[in-house]
Image (cartoon, rainbow, N blue to C red):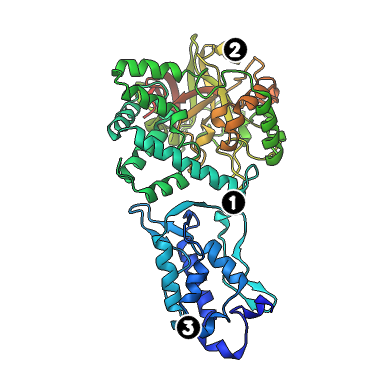
Amino acid sequence: MNDNKLCAGCTTDERDGDGYEALLAGIRRNFSKAVKDESTPLFTTEAPDLYAVFLESIPADARQHYNCNACRHFVNRFGSLVAINPETGKQTAVMWGGQMPEFFRRAVKAVKVKVEAARITGVFMTSEKALGYAKTGVWTHMAVDMPQKLIYRGKVDTAGQKAAQKNEDRSLLLSCIKKYKVQDVESAVNLLRSGSLYQGEKILPMAEWFLETMRAAGGRKINTNILWYRAATAPAGFCHIPASMVGTLLDDIAAGYGSDEVKRRFDEKMHPLKYQRPKADPSEGNVRRAEEIVEKMGLEPSLERRFARLDEVKAIWKPAAEKKQAATGGVFAGVPIKGKKNDRVNGVEAPEVAITFDKFRRTVLPGAQKIELLVGYKTENYAAIVTAVHEDAPPIIRWDFEDERNPFSWYLYNGGSYPGTWGLSSGWNDVTAVVLQPNMWSDRPNGYASAGAMFVLKGARDTRNPTACLFPNILKGELHEVRATIEAYSNGSRMQGKEEASVCGLLIQNSSKWLDVKLRVTSDVGVAHYKIDRWD
């Protein structure tokens, strides 16, 4: 006998009154409601042979009619999926519940009860557009469509491999919660927020997330469901506490080191030439893995980088366009005329005022017609913004997305560099634009905590021959395991397009506790001097 003929989608007259189509609609409705925000993670549970529970809960004379292989496959494989309330940890079956036809109500309730009482076994991920087979021949079956944003589209790992990684993340997170005390994590967050630790803002989001996780999961009395939810929704790498600077900071605090020693040890490890930088040449296996990942992701064109041009970056300020003087030729052309606005600015220059960059951006930039920056003789954070050579190269930078392209990044030299190496002379230099760091060009989360802004200087250009500057901390998470190979490749490559470089200048960042940037700003009412001494 063909099992499909026994499917509930059969249009034979004897079972038309059961409300099977209403059951299918109810399952689809429940699932759509559960995943309507398209960001809710789904979880598998230990609830085997659910279809047997379903069949046993409908009248005996109908069981053979509904003994369908397609529906059995759907219920046993996907019927056990649940969503988790991130506040309480309560799990809810995503297929079962709500308004169902009377004939199937008892069966739906029985399955729902079993699913919601089952132990969660993992994070569910799929690359399929639908769960189940909605139709085979003339018969209809239990099935649901996956929201586009919940379909796994990774190119390196399969959906199963990615789910396994999430499960491992949960295990790592559990071990860390058992290892550290909430008070130690609070101390770490407090130190990082204080700004006393060198570049502490880079790992602050991870430390805060871990503290939130510990509190949400109930400290040492762990709510395992909340732990599953936190692991499933964690930003890339956040569960890997032991291998991170957060872990080393927590270890030092737990070991009882004083604040001065904690700071010394932390600052040494966060040195720009050490933090997230490979300590040795990549292994042969790492190179092979890198080649595999780059091929799967199609990233070979993305490895080529060039200097950016001013016309292609997002600037938060550019100078006002110069007005063209009318050709009068008269001897009295410059005499003020009654009732006509005088374009000359006030000759009195306002004295220097100390200001934060945040306030400068909000209150000064909107009215600035011209900005000049005082270049001194000392080393400063002169930098360049760079981008991909090939416009259609796949994203390799962590804030560059397929549906929101932003392949721009930046580089500077550790310890700063002298203005002469950027073609700059001491004195007042024209600012041609103010540009935020590329990671700030969108509000979309990208996991990069540093904030900064560049005062682009007229004629500034790196006179050296920099590498491709593909640093580990700006790369996509999929490349973390092969960062040693990527950086080795980058160090052997050169930045292209030097002659067209026009987005170079002084970069200020929120990691600098004190700044000393002197600016002369011309507005419609005159000239004023400012000293930016802090970020905010």
Give residue 211's position: percent from left, percent from top.
34, 37
Q: Which mark is residue 152?
A: 1
Residue 241 seen by the camera: yes
Q: Nearer the viewer, mark 1 or mark 2?
A: 1
Give residue 336's position: percent from left, percent from top.
47, 31
Name the residue rendered at 62%, 18% in the picture: 462
Most distant residue in the top direction: 377
Q: Which mark is residue 59?
A: 3
Please indicate whether residue 247 sits to the left or right of residue 323 in the image: left
**What amino acid is labelled 2 in the image?**
Thr
Look at the numbered disc 1 and give the secondary structure of its residue.
loop
Residue 339 seen by the camera: no
Q: How far apart are labels 1 and 2 at the CA level?
A: 47 Å
Q: How far apart are labels 2 and 3 at the CA level?
A: 85 Å
Looking at the image, tell me whether mark 2 or mark 3 is earlier in sequence order: 3
Name the residue rendered at 63%, 30% in the picture: 308
Look at the numbered disc 3 and give the secondary structure of its residue.
loop
Give residue 345's position: percent from left, percent from top.
44, 28
Count of numbered badges drawn on the protein: 3
Q: How many C-alpha atoms fall within 10 Å of the one at disc 1: few (<14), some, or many (≥20)?
A: some
| Residue highlighted by disc 2 | 421
User: 362 or 173, which is in the foreground?
Assistant: 173
Looking at the image, tell me whether mark 3 or mark 1 is earlier in sequence order: 3
Q: In this rendering, is residue 54 above or below 203? A: below
Q: Quadrant of residue 187?
A: top left
Q: How many C-alpha atoms fall within 10 Å of the one at disc 3: few (<14), some, or many (≥20)?
A: few
Are circles 3 and 1 on residues that touch, CB within 8 Å? Answer: no
Are circles 2 and 3 on residues that touch, CB within 8 Å? Answer: no
